[in-house]
Amino acid sequence: MKKTNYSYVGIAFIILVFGIIFVPRIVDAIKDKSIVKSDRLNKPTDNGKAATNDLAFIEINGKARKVPPFGFVDQNGKTIKNTDFEGKVYVVEFFFTTCPTICPRMNSNLVQIQNSFKDNDDFGIASFTINPEHDTVEILKDYARAYGIDHPNWHLMTGEESQIYKLANEGFNLYTAKDQDAEGGFEHSGNFALIDKNGFIRSRKDASGNPIIYYNGMISEAEKTDEEGQEEQISILKEDIAQLLKE
C-alpha cells in the first residue's frame, strides 16, 4: 500500500470516530432545542446588551442606555413618571405647541402611529414641551384636542424647563436649545426615540449593521421622501413598535 493511502485511511478513521462520539450529542441538542434557542433568539441580559430580532440596544460607553427618571404634568393635570410607562413600548419626542416648522409634521405623523395602535394598552407616546413657560396644562389639552390625540397613554408633558432640557440633551441626546434666531425661538431635533417595555432605548440596524439610533419624525409615509431624497421612517417605526410589543 502506498504512503498516501495510509493518510486516507487515517483521515477516514478520524471522521468515523468523530461521527460515533459527537453526532449523537448534536442530535440530542437539537431535540431539546438548545442549539435552536441560542442561534435564533438572543434574550436581553440584565444590562440589555443582547438584542432580539435585530433591534439594537443603544449603548453609551458600552452600557445600554435606559430612560432616566422623570416626572412632569400632562395635558390632564396628572403627574406622569417614567415608571408609568413600565411594561409599555413608547415613542418619545420633544416639541412645543407654537412651533411653526417641524412640530406640526412630527405630531401629524405621531397621530398616524397612534391610530395604528389605538386599542393597544401596552403602547404609549411621551411628548415633552421645550417651551413650558407658554405650554401650560390648558394649552397642551387644547393642542391634543386639535390634533386628535386621544390615546390614553399619549401624555403631553410640561414642567421645570431645566429638567426638560436636561432630559432631552443628556438623557436622550436629542438636541434642544433656545435660539432667538430660529423660527419660533427654539431649536430641537425632529427625531423620535423608541423605548421598549423595560425602559431601554432601541432601534433597528442599518444595512451596515449599525443602529440607526433614532427615527426621522418629519417625513410622512405618504411623502415617501423629502426634498433631499431622504426616505421616510414612520413605516419602519411602526414595524419596530409592533416587534417590541411581542417581546
Image (cartoon, rainbow, N blue to C red):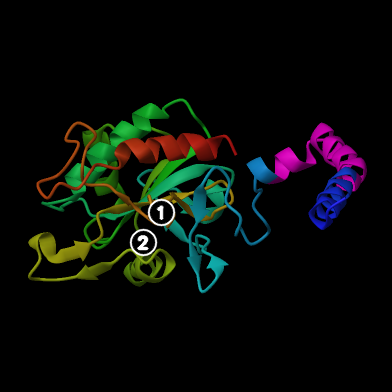
- Residue 92 seen by the camera: yes
Looking at the image, residue 187 lies above or below residue 195: below
Task: Tell me residue 233's x, y (percent).
Answer: 30, 42
Is residue 210 toward the left or the right of residue 121 in the image?
left
Is residue 22 toward the left or the right of residue 226 in the image?
right
Judging by the rendered image, the residue that carries numbered circle 1 is: 73
Tell which circle, 1 or 2, labels the residue nearer the N-terminal end.
1
What residue is at 51 percent from the left and 46 percent from the top?
54
Residue 232 belongs to magenta span = no
Task: Tell me residue 224's x, y (percent).
Answer: 20, 36
Task: Tell me residue 65's x, y (percent).
Answer: 51, 63
Q: CA distance from mark 1 to mark 2?
A: 6 Å
Query: For the C terminus, which image quadrant?
Result: top right
Secondary element type, mark 2: loop
- Residue 150 seen by the camera: no
Instruction: Report if the CB atoms under discs 1 and 2 are less than 8 Å apart.
Output: yes
Secondary element type, mark 1: strand
Judging by the rendered image, the residue that carries numbered circle 2 is: 159
Task: Tell me residue 109's x, y (percent).
Answer: 26, 38
Identified by mark 1, the residue type is: Val
Q: Principal SS element in the magenta part?
A: helix
Label annotation for residue 198:
none
Identified by mark 2, the residue type is: Gly
Is residue 101 toward the left or the right of residue 188 in the image?
left
What residue is at 35 percent from the left and 69 percent from the top?
169
- Identify which residue, 103 or 46, lies in the foreground: 46
Boundaries of the magenta span: 17-38
- Identify which residue, 229 or 45, lies in the foreground: 229
Is residue 194 toward the left or the right of residue 141 in the image?
right
Q: How many marks?
A: 2
- Identify which residue, 16 or 224, lies in the foreground: 16
